[in-house]
Image (tube, rainbow, N blue to C red):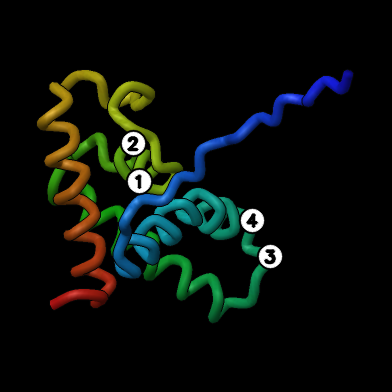
Amino acid sequence: MTVKKEETVYPLRRERRSSIDAIVIAHCLDYSRRCDELLRRTMPRRVLMEYRYLNSRIITAAREVVGTQAEIYVRDIGMQIGYAKSDAASVSESIYKTRKKEVKRRIAQKLNLIG
């Protein structure tokens, strides 16, 4: 008699996401690393200028929508954190999702990914 070993199957996260969303998520995920590099100043000047440009566009776009909570929303977009685990708990879930979607759209506009 042989005992069949149970296999654990992990669900794959396959959400429909446009390439623009993927680019915005990647830029938001890299935001804090670029901030650290700007403080350290170990990279060439040209690279630091590009980092400063990207970060200023991202944070400006987020501040236009959510004001002082901009960094929270940028982090949530980059790390793909939802309402339940977000630090932006002072608003309702529907408002959070609406603002997050608007921040993504505004970042894509500021980075000239959409018109």
Question: How far across and how far down the image is residue 58, in percent?
Answer: 31, 58
**Residues at discs 4 and 3 in contact (Cβ within 8 Å):** yes
Residue on which disc 2 sits = 72
Image disc number at residue 77: 1
The image quarter in which residue 27 lies: bottom left
The image quarter in which residue 26 lies: bottom left
Q: Viewer-proximal residue, 2 or 46? A: 2
Q: Residue at x 50, y 53 (%)?
A: 35
> What is the CA distance from the residue labelled 2 to the residue labelled 4?
23 Å
* Label 2 Cα neighbours within 10 Å, binned few <14 / some 14-19 / many ≥20: some
Q: In terms of secondary structure, where does tag 4 sit?
A: helix
> What is the CA distance from the residue labelled 1 to the residue labelled 2?
9 Å
Q: Which callout, 2 or 3, points to the residue nearer the camera?
A: 2
Q: Work out whether 115 lies above or below 95.
A: below
**Residues at discs 2 and 4 in contact (Cβ within 8 Å):** no
Question: How far across and how far down the image is residue 6, in percent?
Answer: 71, 25
Q: Residue at x 42, y 48 (%)?
A: 78
> What is the CA distance from the residue labelled 4 to the residue labelled 1?
25 Å
Residue on which disc 3 sits = 42
Q: In terms of secondary structure, where does tag 2 sit?
A: helix
Q: Amino acid at mark 3?
A: Thr
**Residues at discs 4 and 1 in contact (Cβ within 8 Å):** no
Residue on which disc 4 sits = 40
Ranked by sequence position, the earlier of labels 4 and 1 is 4
Q: Among all residues in the image, which is located at the extreme bottom?
A: 46
Q: Work out whether 54 lies above or below 35.
A: below
Q: Is residue 42 left or right of residue 4?
A: left
Q: Is residue 72 left or right of residue 95?
A: right
* Label 3 Cα neighbours within 10 Å, binned few <14 / some 14-19 / many ≥20: few
